[in-house]
């Protein structure tokens, strides 16, 4: 008697299961959000909150032109030859900065999402994401403002080298903006930063002294030609900027707030949703353009 065996093989995929039995894996405390670009310009401005909680939307920063001394021959002591002083009248003006626009990032989260995924604090994660979105907008606005600023010092170089950056920095020294150890910041892109890394005169940030660390701005990667180097990934290869950041002569670039960054939430009970908004009102302004050197590079790295 011959026996026959029948073997049935079947691969059961997740698509074959009822919806309520679909496998689901949630890695606890892990939510992939990707990387955001460095926001270095926010550390290169002077923040002002004088408008917050006050009437009006415009702040006026007083400014005065420089005047010169006059030389006069000494008068004869026995004669009345000195007619009087020549008056120098300084020009008094104001730099007006008006804040109008509202910048915001808003999101909604459902009650079901939150209660089904309790291992991840979705509220804090999305809130941090929204705040970063607002900060990115602020950083973009400051960069765009400096790029378009008029009345700045300018320097045209053929490449990013130690001598060329020293010469560009010297424009701020010659006009009195930098004296002695006054701090300055060189803003460049990644390609030019990598070029400087091959120069023996580049001092990486991990080799900063204690005093240098105290003066270090956020995002500084090293020292080069008397400047702290920070990297803005969105700059072009043929551009760079040197800014005086010591504050001794007052504000170079101001960031004026009418409303500092704040968070407000509203619950919609019948929809089981909570809407949150991160908002701010601000205006960046180049107050003293001569504290900035715009660098144009005639060749790319």
Image (cartoon, helix red, strand yellow):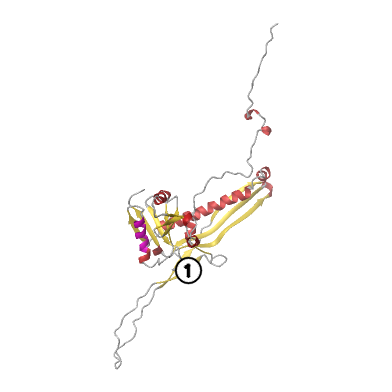
* Residue 166 position by quadrant: bottom left
- At x 56% / y 53%, what residue is drawn? 131
- At x 56% / y 51%, what residue is drawn? 130
Give coordinates of residue 140: x percent, y percent. Answer: 47, 54
Q: Nearer the viewer, residue 216 or 64?
A: 216
* Residue on which disc 1 sits: 60
Furthest residue toward right: 1
Q: Residues within 10 Å of mark 1 (few under 14, many from 20)?
A: few
Q: Point out the stretch of residues depicted in magenta.
A: 162-171
Q: Using the image, determine if residue 14 lies above or below residue 139.
A: above
Give coordinates of residue 106: x percent, y percent. Answer: 58, 51
Give coordinates of residue 244: x percent, y percent. Answer: 42, 63
* Left or right, 5 with reference to 239: right
Q: Nearer the viewer, residue 12 or 200?
A: 200
Give coordinates of residue 261: x percent, y percent. Answer: 56, 58
Q: Using the image, determine if residue 111 lies above or below residue 293.
A: above
* Left or right, 166 with reference to 230: left
- Majority SS type along the magenta span: helix
User: Can residue 164 be found in the magenta stretch?
Assistant: yes
* Left or right, 122 with reference to 208: right
Observer able to see residue 268: yes
Q: Nearer the viewer, residue 85 or 157?
A: 157
Q: Using the image, determine if residue 115 lies above or below residue 7.
A: below
């Amino acid at each position: 008697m011959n026996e026959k065996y029948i073997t049935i093989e079947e691969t059961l995929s997740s698509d074959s299961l009822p919806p309520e039995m679909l496998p689901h894996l949630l890695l606890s405390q892990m939510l992939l959000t990707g990387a955001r670009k460095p926001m270095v310009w926010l550390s290169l401005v002077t923040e002002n909150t004088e408008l917050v909680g006050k009437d009006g939307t415009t702040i006026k920063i007083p400014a005065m032109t420089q005047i010169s001394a006059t030389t006069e021959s000494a008068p004869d002591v026995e004669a009345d030859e000195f007619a009087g002083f020549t008056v120098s009248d300084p020009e008094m003006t104001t730099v007006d900065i008006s804040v109008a626009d509202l910048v915001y990032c808003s999101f909604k989260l459902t009650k079901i999402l939150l209660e089904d995924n309790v291992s991840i604090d979705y509220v804090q994660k999305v809130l941090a994401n929204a705040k970063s979105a607002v900060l990115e907008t602020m950083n973009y606005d400051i960069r765009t403002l400096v790029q378009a600023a008029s009345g700045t010092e300018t320097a045209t170089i053929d490449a990013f080298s130690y001598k060329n950056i020293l010469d560009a920095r010297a424009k701020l020294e010659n006009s009195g903006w930098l004296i002695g150890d006054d701090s300055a910041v060189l803003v460049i892109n990644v390609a030019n930063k990598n070029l400087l890394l091959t120069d023996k005169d580049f001092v990486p940030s991990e080799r900063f002294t204690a005093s240098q660390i105290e003066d270090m701005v956020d995002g500084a990667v090293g020292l080069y030609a008397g400047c702290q180097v920070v990297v803005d990934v969105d700059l072009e290869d043929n551009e760079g900027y040197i800014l005086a950041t010591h504050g001794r002569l007052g504000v170079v670039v101001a960031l004026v707030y009418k409303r500092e960054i704040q968070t407000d939430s509203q619950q919609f009970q019948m929809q089981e949703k909570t809407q949150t908004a991160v908002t701010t009102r601000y205006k960046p302004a180049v107050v003293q353009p001569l504290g900035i050197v715009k660098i144009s590079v005639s060749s790319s790295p």
